[in-house]
């Protein structure tokens, strides 16, 4: 992994085609929420598929917890869509057959000359693409478990949500004073938030 991709740094805002061939930027998919970013080998890899099957269940929690999930592989768009459909996923999968991310981050899996994939990584991002934690998953048990991701997201959400603990007297007073900008979705209605999120909310196409 490139030397400057470390906790506290801002992750590159890559723009790639998604599973529908629509070009998407990571910042657009993240919005104002925490995000889990999976850099994988692709649909050919049984380890990637097993990780994605676990993430299918976690994604249901991410949706209600206002967190995002994105997968990037070196598969082409057709393979990306088949991989996503095959594991029953409903979040955005991005396609990088040109290996833009692999080359830029210096994560070519040099032990596999046949597929030339990325070394798998799972990255937990705070809002603004700020890196909170990086897991390297060349071996399957190096990958984040679903419980580790839950714990990571709890820490990130405590940091980025001013209304994490609405039991405090200060927040209750702010609500009574009409300071709704201190409460999620921070000055917007939920309808506005959903409209702005588009298919980035759950990965389904409009």
Image (spheres, rainbow, N blue to C red):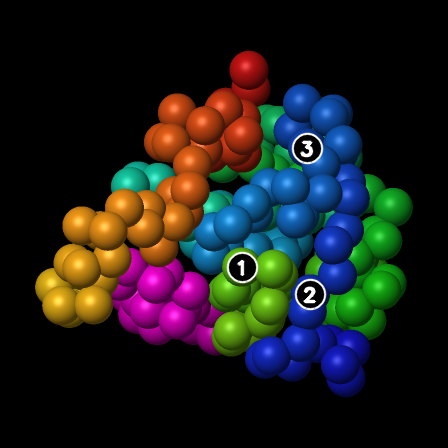
Q: Position of residue 46 (x, y in %)?
A: 51, 50
Q: CA distance from mark 2 to mark 1?
A: 11 Å
The tag on residue 18 is 3
Q: Is residue 36 magenta?
A: no
Q: Which residues are magenta?
A: 139-164
Question: Which residue occupies 56% across, 47% down?
Answer: 30
Of marks 2 and 1, the one in the foreground: 1
Q: Residue furthest bottom?
A: 3
Q: Quadrant of the N terminus?
A: bottom right
Tally of numbered tags: 3
Q: Position of residue 51 (x, y in %)?
A: 44, 53
- Pointers 2 and 1 in contact (CB under 8 A)? no
Residue carrying label 2 = 11
| Closest to the observer, 87 or 160 | 160
Residue carrying label 1 = 127
The relative height of residue 200 versus residue 78 in the rendered view (above or below) is below
The relative height of residue 98 versus residue 192 in the rendered view (above or below) is below
- The kind of secondary structure element at disc 1 is loop
């Amino acid at each position: 992994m490139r030397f400057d991709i470390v906790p506290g740094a801002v992750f590159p805002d890559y723009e790639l085609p998604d599973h529908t061939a629509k070009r998407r930027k990571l910042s657009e998919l993240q919005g104002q929420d925490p995000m889990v970013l999976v850099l994988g080998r692709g649909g050919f890899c049984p380890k990637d598929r097993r990780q994605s099957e676990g993430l299918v269940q976690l994604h249901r929690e991410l949706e209600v917890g206002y967190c995002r999930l994105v997968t990037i592989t070196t598969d082409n768009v057709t393979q990306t869509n088949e991989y996503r459909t095959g594991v029953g996923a409903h979040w955005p999968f991005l396609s990088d057959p040109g290996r833009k991310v692999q080359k830029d981050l210096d994560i070519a899996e040099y032990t596999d000359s046949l597929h030339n994939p990325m070394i798998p990584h799972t990255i937990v991002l705070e809002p603004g693409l700020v890196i909170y934690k990086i897991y390297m998953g060349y071996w399957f048990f190096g990958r984040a478990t679903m419980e580790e991701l839950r714990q990571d997201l709890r820490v990130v959400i405590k940091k980025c949500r001013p209304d994490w603990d609405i039991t405090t007297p200060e927040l209750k007073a702010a609500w009574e004073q009409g300071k709704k900008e201190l409460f999620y979705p921070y000055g917007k209605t939920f309808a506005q938030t959903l409209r702005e999120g588009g298919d980035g909310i759950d990965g389904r196409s409009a």
